[in-house]
Amino acid sequence: MKAMSLRASSVFAVLLAAQCHAAIWPDRIGEFERKPSTSLAVSDRPLYEEFGLETTEQAEYASPKAKFTATAWRMKDSTGALALFEFRRPPGAKPAKLAKLSVTTDDGVILAYGNYVLQFTGRAPTVAELTPTLEALPRLEQSQLPALMSYLPADGLIPNSERYVLGPVSLERFEPRISPSMAAFHMGAEGQLGRYQAVGGKGAETNLAIFSYPTPSMARDRAEAFGKLSGAMVKRTGSLVALVLAPADPDTAERLLAKVNHQISLTFNETPKEQKARGFLGMVNNAIIFSFIMMGFCLVAGVALGGLTVLRRKFGKPEDQPAMITLGLDGK
């Protein structure tokens, strides 16, 4: 039995590994045919693993007229893909229209789609070529992107400077002045970093970090902790904590922090007081109407019963039982 169990476990492990390393790229993209695929070495494995890397694949595609290289990184979820996309996006990249998260580079295009980060070098695919490829991606996960990425103020943000933080490794890579214990990732924290130009384009840049927490109380606790950092300017708004470390221009940092605002939207199942009042009045109104209907029904039923009794007596038909019980008080 133990041997059979071990054999079954081994088979399951092999099947699971085969599923994880299943081919990502199709045999054809448009008129381009795929050459043999290869795995891709990861330069900063701790960072990629923190982002949730599952597997990679690189393939060469060629046609009689051109060729290009396609590289794919599959992550556990779309948040990890966002983090890797921001990390791999080069400084000079320009926004593209292939996907919501896509940029053109000097030699191709990089995009994030669901839990995938895809890079094409040598040639950028067209929308018609790319769409069937995206739809056929294995183990595709398309959960909603984190809202935290939208809280970085747009004014003055240096293009492609954003970095998403998911744990101690990415925090050390992108903002080593903040310790992992200060960010408190064990509380479910995530961070979005961005660099901002100085006023007038001259002077030192300003680094803004925004951390999100599950509850406002947790954010309040972290804001107090961040405030102990030397030279830190901290603001808490809802469940977010924004901070600028040792800014060269405190006024610029103050204006930047003022633009970070978290609006909490709450939905209550409880009926508002006005609706409750209208509901109570409607219930009373319906009860009154129902009472009049029942009174009318009883009146009609009484008249019908009395008329039937008179007709039975008029035509001399014996009654099965007395129509009315009398007390016989006339003789007293």
Image (cartoon, rainbow, N blue to C red):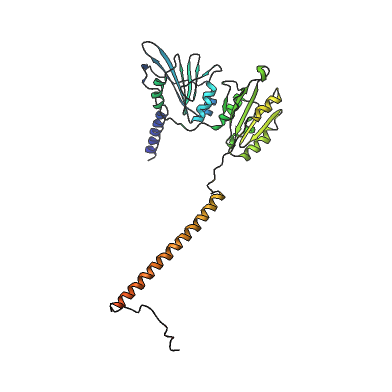
Vertically, is 309 above or below 93? below
Q: Is residue 166 visible?
A: no
Q: Residue furthest top?
A: 65
Left or right: where 251 falls relative to 22:
right
Residue 250 position, x and y percent, is: 71, 25
Residue in the picture at 51% in, 24% down:
85
Q: Write the residue at 37% across / 70% down.
A: 303
Residue 313 position in % (x across, y down): 31, 78
What residue do we see at 54% from left, 23% from top?
86
Q: Residue 172 falls in which quadrant of the image?
A: top right
* Residue 175, x across and y down, in percent: 62, 25
Q: Where does the N terminus fall, quadrant-wise?
A: top left
- The percent coordinates of residue 97 (x first, y second) are 47, 21
Residue 300 vertical placement versus 2 (above, below): below
**Quadrant of the image occupied by residue 124:** top left
User: Quarter of the image containing the C terminus?
Assistant: bottom left
Q: Quadrant of residue 179?
A: top right
Q: Residue furthest front?
A: 314
